Image (cartoon, grey):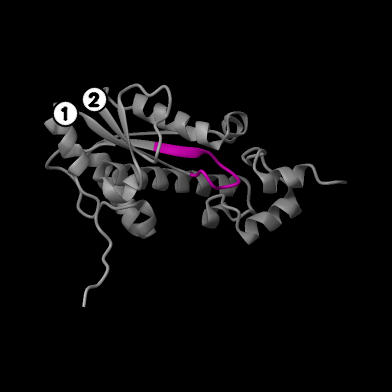
Amino acid sequence: MMTLMTLAPEETFEGAAEARGLARVAGVDEVGRGPLAGPVTAAAVRLRPGRIPQGLADSKTLTSRRREALYAELLDVAEVSVAHASAAEIDRLNILQASHLAMCRALAGLPAPVDLALVDGNRLPTGMPCPGQAIVRGDALCVSIAAASIVAKVVRDRIMGALAQQHPGYGWERNAGYGTREHCQALLDLGPTPYHRRSFAPVRNILYQPQ
């Protein structure tokens, strides 16, 4: 009887790029498209052959403790850049364009330009500083993108934990800004903060409800 197993991301995409003479390859991913508050955060990670941490996977499949351990290891063995687009930029641009902006900023922040960016999703950001390849479910299939997903998730969760200390009551240390029942009730009771995305319907409805 066959059992279904979760496949670990592989180095197939990186190997194919290297075979084309593209030596410097980075994975790019973002977290935070869905929350009602906080930035959208992107990471670009260039793994070094022979120094790839074991156990890299889509950040959503890992425990918080495992993500933190892999994050620390990645900082030691890989080139890592993290960037953000703020709630105000999300409201001005829309969440897709803001996510792409954060990705471009993360790529631009790497220590040296890369030959190819492997980007999670079905489309490439405009204005990328290098050629790119979009990979659907890249965080589950491509080891460089999986690494980027872990870095972005850890950094953004830490940001939301810090913001929770400044704005208690919304539960950001637990929900990372997503629209949980606790968060939505706090929006009704406390109102929006400067870090809330006013273009998102639950926040907009609170702002413009009849007095």
Give whichever of discs 1 and 2 has the lower sequence position.
1
Q: Which residue is mark 1?
A: 23
In the image, residue 38 lies in the stretch drawn in magenta = yes
Which of 71 and 199 lies nearest the eye of the viewer? 199
| Other-residue count near label 2 (Cα within 10 Å), few / some / many at <14 / 14–19 / ≥20 | some
| Other-residue count near label 1 (Cα within 10 Å), few / some / many at <14 / 14–19 / ≥20 | some
Amino acid beneath label 2: Asp
Mark 1 touching mark 2, by CB under 8 A? yes
Q: Is residue 178 something that shows in the picture?
A: yes
Q: Main secondary structure of the magenta part?
A: loop
Residue 98, x across and y down, in percent: 51, 32
Q: Is residue 48 something that shows in the picture?
A: no
Residue 96, x across and y down, in percent: 51, 36
Most extreme residue toward the front, as rendered?
1
Q: Which residue is mark 2?
A: 115
Report the magenta residues as a range.
32-42
- Asked which secondary structure carries label 2, the reply is loop
| Gap in angstroms between the C-alphas marked 1 and 2 | 7 Å
> Which label is found at residue 65?
none
Q: Residue at x 45, y 38 (%)?
A: 41
Amino acid beneath label 1: Ala
